[in-house]
Amino acid sequence: MLNLLRLRDVADYAGNPQLAPAQPISGAEAYDRYIEHTLPYLAESGGALLFLGEGGPFLIGPEGERWDRAMLVRQRSVQAFMAFASHDTYLAGLGHRTAAIEDSRLLPLVQAPLPPAGW
């Protein structure tokens, strides 16, 4: 799954005050807390974080559109993802993601064979 993430300047914990830190933090810091919370449950479900990258200006794309981070996550099956996404203990930390994210896109991908060499 390809995740495109636009992060808030300041994390908004209004919907999850029980997770809020004592002092305001950035959306990036809140998302880092989400990743730290999530990785054990992702691994337990057979998934893995393959790539996490910082975004920048588009080479080709709509002017003014930005994505602060891109993330590539592998999951062994749709069923494994659904089990992961409904795990109660995982869901208990989901508020860090909600606090961090201004906007996001999630694109499921299926690996395709590479074209032959010399193509």
Image: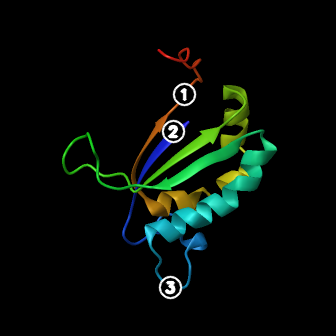
Q: CA distance from mark 2 to mark 3?
A: 31 Å
State the residue position of label 1: 109
Q: Is residue 28 above or below residue 72?
A: below
- Residue 98 location in percent, x, y? 49, 57
Q: Is residue 97 above or below residue 110?
A: below
Q: CA distance from mark 3 to mark 1?
A: 38 Å
Locate the N terminus by quadrant.
top right
User: Does residue 59 appear left or right of residue 49 in this picture?
Assistant: left
Query: Which is nearer the eye, 26 or 63?
Result: 63
Query: Which is nearer the eye, 53 or 101?
Result: 53
Q: Secondary structure at mark 3?
A: loop
Which residue reaches farthest right? 44
Q: Residue at x 47, y 62 (%)?
A: 100
Q: How many marks?
A: 3
Q: Sequence order check: which comes first, mark 2 or mark 3?
A: 2
Q: Secondary structure at mark 1?
A: loop
Q: CA distance from mark 1 to mark 2?
A: 7 Å
Q: Secondary structure at mark 2?
A: strand
Q: Are marks 1 and 2 in contact (CB under 8 Å)?
A: yes
Q: Sequence order check: which comes first, mark 1 or mark 2?
A: 2
Which of label 3 and label 1 is nearer to you? 1
- Residue 16 location in percent, x, y? 54, 66
State the residue position of label 3: 23
Which of label 2 and label 3 is nearer to you? 2
